[in-house]
Each structure stands twice: as C-alpha cells, then as structure tokens.
Amino acid sequence: MAEVLAQLDALLAELQSALTDQAWDALAAGNDRVRPLLEGMLAEFEAGRLSEAAVRDRLEAFQAFCDQAQGQAETARDSARQALEGMQKNRKAARSYQDVSDRRSR
C-alpha cells in the first residue's frame, strides 16, 4: 500500500527536478508515468488500504505541480517566441543589407 505512495512521491520529486532544470523531455517522459500511478493509488484507496488524507495530499501536490509547470512552460514558450521574433528581425535586416549590397555591386 505505501509502495504506490512512495512511487508517487519519488515521481513528483523527479518531475520537480526536471521542471527546475527546464528539462522538457524528462517532464514529458515523467508525465507518461503519472496516470498509472494515480490510478493505482485510487485503487488502493477504494480497497481501503490508503487513508483519505494520504490520497488528498498526493492529489493536491500533483495539482500544485501541474499549476507550477504550466506557468513555467508558458514563460518558456513566450521567451522562445520573443527570441524567434528577434531572429526573424535580424534575418530581415541581413537580407535588406544584402539586397542593398547586391545593387551597389552591379
């Protein structure tokens, strides 16, 4: 019974570490393991082998993590968008300069 809780706690710690490191691939891989563990926890709860408090604590912890991860992912996405827009502006400027240089060399 406590094994599923230990696995969930370990997974949450792993996901928190991946989020801190912005290791998006590790987060995606870890996310694939969340649902089966949560389902296992709920099955243990329904069988009367886990307390309501233990289940509630894990669910709240995962919800808090999801909220935090979403915020950080949105921030990373926005940063990437800004960097891409900056690169596109630089690319346009370089093309314009190249066009002017090409006209002068004719």
Image: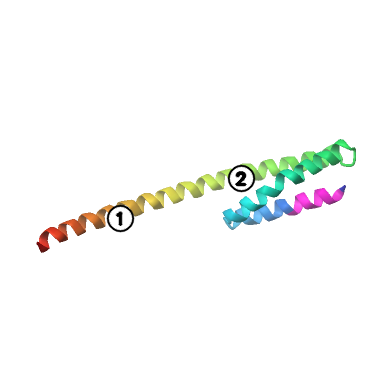
At x 89%, y 37%, the residue is 47
Q: Is residue 60 left or right of residue 95?
A: right
Is 19 covered by the magenta stretch? Answer: no
Instruction: Check the image and name the residue furthest to the front.
Output: 106
Cα–Cα span, label 2 and label 1: 33 Å
Element assignment for label 2: helix
x and y percent of residue 82 in the render?
Answer: 40, 49
- What's the magenta region? 2-10
Query: What number is the disc on residue 90?
Result: 1
At x 30%, y 51%, the residue is 89
Is 4 covered by the magenta stretch? Answer: yes
x and y percent of residue 18 in the render?
Answer: 62, 56
Q: Amino acid at mark 1?
A: Asn
Element assignment for label 1: helix
Q: Quadrant of the C terminus?
A: bottom left
Instruction: Check the image and name the residue furthest to the bottom.
Output: 105
Query: What number is the disc on residue 68?
Result: 2
Q: Is residue 4 left or right of residue 86?
A: right
Residues packed near mark 2 inside 10 Å, few (<14), some (14 to 19) or many (20 plus): few
Q: Amino acid at mark 2?
A: Gln
Q: Quadrant of residue 91?
A: bottom left
Q: Are marks 2 and 1 in contact (CB under 8 Å)?
A: no
